[in-house]
Image (cartoon, grey):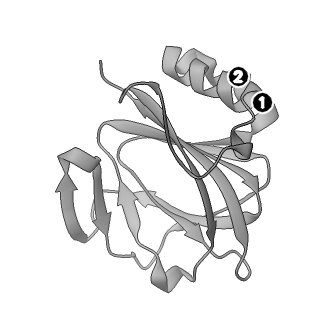
Amino acid sequence: MILDRLENSARYEFLGKRFAQAFTLLRTGNLAAKEAGNYEVDGKKLYYMVQNYNTKPKEERRFESHRVYADIQVVFSGREMMGLTKVAGLDVKTPYEDAKDIMFFGTPADYTELKMETGDFVILFPGEAHMPQTQWDGPAQVSKVVFKVSLYD
C-alpha cells in the first residue's frame, strides 16, 4: 500500500508503464469532470471508474481484495475512511470471482483505518484487503476515480 498526495504522483511512475499512464491522466485529464462510469485506457489492462457516492457506516461495508489488478484510488472531493488489512486469516464471505477479479471478506476485529480527503491517493496491491467508501466522522459525498492496473500482460 502506498498513500500520498496527487501532486506527488510522478514519484510512483517507476512502478511501470501503466502506472505512469494512469498518473499522467490523473494529473492532466480532468477525470473528475467526467460522468460516473467506466473508461478504458488500454483495454482491460488499464481502465478507470469515475464514482460519486455517499460514504456508509463501517457496519454496511465489506473488505475486498484482488488478484490481478492493483488499484489507484484518488479522492477528488470529499473524505472517507478506508479499512486496510492483510488477506491472510480473513473470513471469506464471497469466493474469488475471476471475471470481476474480486473476493469479499468479513470485517476483522482489528484493522488499520486510513483517512483520505481531497487530493489523497492510495495504491493497493493484490493481497491487501481494503474497505472503501466508509464514513470517517459522518456521512460525506465523495467524488473518486479508481484506476485498475493489470499487473500481468
Could you say whether the residue bearing mark 1 is in a helix, strand or loop? Answer: helix
Local crowd size for mark 2, using a 10 Å CA cut-off: few (<14), some (14–19), many (≥20): few
Which residue is painted at 76% across and 25% down in the image? 28
Q: Which amino acid does label 1 sit on?
A: Asn
Quadrant assignment for the C terminus? top left
Tally the marks: 2
**Position above or below: 106 against 4:** below
Which residue is painted at 25% across and 71% down in the image? 91
Could you say whether the residue bearing mark 2 is in a helix, strand or loop? Answer: helix
- Tell me the tag on residue 8: 1
Q: Is residue 58 visible?
A: yes
**Position above or below: 71 against 86:** above
**Image location of residue 104, percent across then percent down:** 30, 65
Local crowd size for mark 1, using a 10 Å CA cut-off: few (<14), some (14–19), many (≥20): few
- Tell me the tag on residue 110: none
**Looking at the image, do the residues carrying marks 2 and 1 touch, with CB atoms under 8 Å apart?**
yes
Question: Looking at the rendering, which quadrant does residue 27 occupy?
Answer: top right
